[in-house]
Image (tube, rainbow, N blue to C red):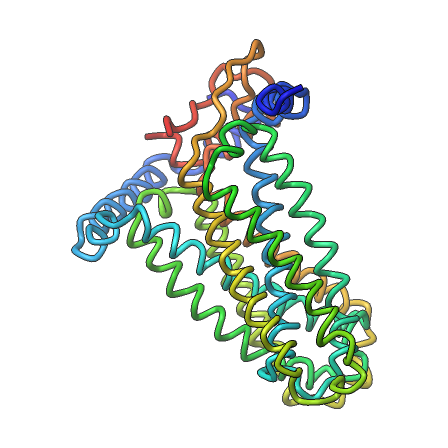
């Protein structure tokens, strides 16, 4: 199976079809994605500012990290899952989008940055755990992390402005909106805006 | 209109509702012709996504600031610190980020008045922002006055813990409604946007 067949298969999957057929599932998934990334960015910023010595300087780094990082991972899981759901609705378009690709690269770089941090400053935590700020390697990782995560937010927003919503024709009449929750059938429900 | 709830709504004086809605649309249209709005519209391809991205980074700071104080109240984080110490750490960031959100939010309204103002999501969101900000302000003032009482007693009360969870959920709802401004048609005939 080559790549384009695979992407087409993702788009044709029943989950993707269900999301496309509904006009409110996609917005709700996107909302959950924003909640998740707000948590990811916010908690990472808390850690990075601690490394740089800008905030929480009185608290040992390890205590900060154990309070915060589990929520980062939980939120990251939420963004990854919701991101995957959004991706499959329009896989071919997202895959070829430059901002989407750059965002994926930035995510990988953020991961590598984290691994390098563990290998360098992470190995000597016991020496600077209670210090006001981390050694140079830790500060460098913190700056890179902040730059990368802010870039990831920007790139994500740009994906939305450079791709069109999926318009794959489906057999089923799409659900219209909130009115469907109260009353079956799109008889009197207003149409969504053209764009 | 023969929705189940349509009859409830028809008890409102229809003409008043229409007038208010038209005034809002007129205001949005007037705003869209102002110099600053036209400037943003002329540069919208990069200005709108840039403002939105800063807005999202800001909401991350706000959300986590509220979250960390709530976790402290729930006893799930920062237990080596008093509630006042945790609040001192995150309060100023909450205030600062809220100012950023207010500024970028205002720019978005000026840049796309009709898209923002003529929606249900925007106005419910603004109401919740007012509630969320009020809770945060009152909490910080009251905590400062009765620090010891909070630390020894109030923090252990179930109602206070419940309020902490509620506060966090308010900010989650604010984010969701913020995103739904772009999809206001999900509210169906409740949305003025679909009546164009």
Q: Where on the picture, by quarter, is residue B26?
A: top left
Q: Where on the picture, by quarter, is residue B182?
A: top left
Query: Residue, x 61% and y 71% (percent of image)?
Result: A141
Q: Residue B122 appears at what percent x and percent y?
A: 44, 49
Q: Residue B116 appears at what percent x and percent y?
A: 37, 47
Q: Is residue A107 left or right of residue B187?
A: right
Give whichever of A20, A184 is nearer the camera: A20
Q: Is residue B193 left or right of residue B9?
A: left
Give whichever of A113, A160 is nearer the camera: A113
Q: Say if A113 sits above or below B44 in the image.
A: below
- Residue B143 showing in the rendered view: no
Query: Residue, x 56% and y 62% (percent of image)?
Result: B60
Q: Residue A178 appears at what percent x and percent y?
A: 55, 30
Query: Residue, x 25% and y 50% (percent of image)?
Result: B43
Q: Residue A3 appears at what percent x and percent y?
A: 61, 25
Query: Residue, x 66% and y 61% (percent of image)?
Result: B168
Q: Residue furthest top?
A: A171
Quadrant housing the C terminus of chain B: top left
How many callouts does the rendering have? 0
Give whichever of A94, B65 is nearer the camera: A94
Give whichever of B50, B173 is nearer the camera: B50
Q: Is residue B53 left or right of residue A183?
A: left
- Residue B180 showing in the rendered view: yes
């Amino acid at each position: 199976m080559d790549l384009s067949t695979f992407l087409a298969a993702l788009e044709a999957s029943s989950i993707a079809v269900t999301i496309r057929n509904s006009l409110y599932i996609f917005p709700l998934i996107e909302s959950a994605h924003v909640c998740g990334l707000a948590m990811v960015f916010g908690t990472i910023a808390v850690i990075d500012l601690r490394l740089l010595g800008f905030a929480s300087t009185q608290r040992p780094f390890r205590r900060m990290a154990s309070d915060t990082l589990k929520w980062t991972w939980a939120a990251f899981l939420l963004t990854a899952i919701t991101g995957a759901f959004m991706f499959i609705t329009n896989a071919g378009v997202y895959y070829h989008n430059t901002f989407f690709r750059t965002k994926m690269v930035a995510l990988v770089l953020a991961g590598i940055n984290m691994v390098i941090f563990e290998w360098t400053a992470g190995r000597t935590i016991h020496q600077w755990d209670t210090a006001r700020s981390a050694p140079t390697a830790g500060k460098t990782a913190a700056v890179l992390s902040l730059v990368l995560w802010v870039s990831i937010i920007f790139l994500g927003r740009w994906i939305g402005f450079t791709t069109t919503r999926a318009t794959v024709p489906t057999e089923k009449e799409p659900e219209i909106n909130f009115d469907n929750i109260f009353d079956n059938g799109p008889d009197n429900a207003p149409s969504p805006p053209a764009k | 209109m023969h929705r189940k709830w349509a009859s409830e709504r028809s008890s409102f004086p229809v003409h008043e509702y229409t007038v208010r809605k038209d005034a809002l649309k007129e205001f949005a249209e007037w705003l869209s012709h102002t110099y600053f709005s036209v400037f943003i519209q002329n540069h919208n391809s990069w200005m709108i996504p840039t403002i939105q991205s800063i807005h999202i980074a800001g909401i991350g700071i706000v959300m986590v600031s509220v979250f960390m104080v709530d976790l402290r109240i729930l006893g799930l984080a920062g237990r080596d610190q008093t509630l006042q110490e945790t609040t001192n750490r995150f309060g100023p960031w909450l205030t600062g980020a809220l100012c950023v959100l207010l500024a970028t939010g205002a720019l978005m309204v000026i840049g796309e008045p009709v898209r923002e103002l003529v929606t249900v999501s925007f106005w419910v969101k603004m109401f919740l922002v007012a509630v969320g900000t009020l809770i945060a302000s009152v909490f910080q003032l009251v905590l400062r006055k009765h620090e010891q009482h909070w630390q020894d007693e109030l923090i252990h009360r179930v109602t206070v813990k419940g309020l902490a969870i509620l506060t966090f959920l308010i900010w989650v709802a604010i984010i969701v409604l913020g995103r739904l401004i772009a999809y206001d048609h999900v509210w169906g005939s409740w949305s003025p946007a679909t009546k164009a």
